[in-house]
Each structure stands twice: as structure tokens, then as C-alpha cells.
Image (cartoon, helix red, strand yellow):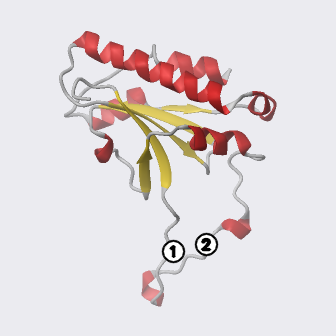
Amino acid sequence: MLLTWIAEVADEPLVLEPNDRQAELDANTWWLSTGEGERGSLSVSEVVAAFERTAAVIRARVRERGFAGAATFYVWHDVQAGQLRCSTLSTTPDALPFGGNHVTCDDLGPLVEGFLAENEPGFVDRADLDEVHSHAQGTARRDAGPFAVWVSSVGASH
């Protein structure tokens, strides 16, 4: 099912409205997951290939529309939700709307590998959580390391 869902993303309505980022996020963002049984039967290469095909179809759709600006299709692994997420925005890879610490990459393999290797998607062991203190107590919260976001330029200016 996961490979089917990834392929279906390419055919879903696509909103490219540079002046309405929220409309783009609402229409173009997808949450993808799978059960443990399917997760174990998938290979990294077939999931990566599915996302690459989806990016190619979206790139063709953007060009067919005559959209002249930058556009980026991107994928990330939301560890807390146990999902792969993807979206398309009319922006460059360096302007993605993440509030958290992230780094863009051009190798989707490690990201997918991490998703497929999860034993209990969405489960975060208490021992893995950092203690959080208020700034009023004089200690700062330790930031988590950056998460990877795979990017593929799909706009005319790529």
C-alpha cells in the first residue's frame, strides 16, 4: 500500500500559490505510513524509486501548467508520528517551512532506511527524551539534532 500511496501523491490536486503558503501546505502535504508487516517487506530502493517517480510526475505537471517560479517536492521522516511525510511548495529548498532544526539532503536512502527500521513507529522511549527546564530556572533546553529533509526541485527554475 505504501508504494501505491506514494504514487497517488503525484496525481493529487496540486496548489502552487506563492502568496498563499497555507493553501499550498493544506493541499500538498501528505502523511504516509504502513503496518509492521508491510514495512518489513519493503526495500529502501523501491521506496526511494517511488518518491523519485512521484517527483518526476510533479515536475512534469508544474511545467505543463507553465509555472515559472521555484518549486520543491520534499520528504521527511516524522519520527514522533512514525510517518514519512511529503509536500510540494512554491519555494526553494532553503526556504522550507520547518520551525525545527533540519538539513536538506539529496540522498533519500538513509531517511527511508530509518523509517523502515522502526520497530514501533511513533513510539519514543522515555529514556530518549531530554529533560526540559524553563528558561526562568536558568537552564536551556537541549535542542535535538537536525532531521533530514530530502529535496527535489520541481519548478521551472531548477
The residue shown at (48%, 89%) is 137
| Location of residue 100 in the rendering, given as x and y in whole percent from the top left corner | 43, 57
Q: Is residue 93 left or right of residue 156?
A: right
Q: Amino acid at mark 2?
A: Asp
Q: Evaluate whether residue 132 shows in this view.
A: yes
Give the mark count. Answer: 2
In this view, 145 is above or below 135: above
> Disc 1 vs disc 2: Cβ atoms closer than 8 Å?
yes
The residue shown at (43%, 23%) is 55
Q: Earlier in the sequence, mark 1 or mark 2?
A: 2
Q: Is residue 20 left or right of residue 7?
A: left
What label sits on residue 130 in the rendered view? 2
Residue 128 versus residue 59: which sits nearer the camera? 59
| Location of residue 91 in the rendering, given as x and y in whole percent from the top left corner | 27, 36
Q: Amino acid at mark 1?
A: Arg
| Location of residue 90 in the rendering, given as x and y in whole percent from the top left corner | 27, 32
In this view, 36 is above or below 57: below
In this view, 91 is above or below 98: above
| Location of residue 10 in the rendering, given as x and y in whole percent from the top left corner | 46, 17
Q: For residue 151, what is the image quadrant?
A: top left
Q: For residue 6, what is the image quadrant?
A: top right
Label 2: state its secondary structure.
loop
**Disc 1 designates what residue?**
142
Q: Which class describes the residues within 10 Å of circle 2: few (<14), some (14-19), or many (20+)?
A: few
The residue shown at (30%, 17%) is 62
Q: Is residue 149 left or right of residue 15?
A: right
Q: Quadrant of the N terminus?
A: top right
The residue shown at (44%, 39%) is 106
Q: Quadrant of the C terminus?
A: top left
Label 1: state its secondary structure.
loop
Q: Which class describes the residues within 10 Å of circle 1: few (<14), some (14-19), or many (20+)?
A: few
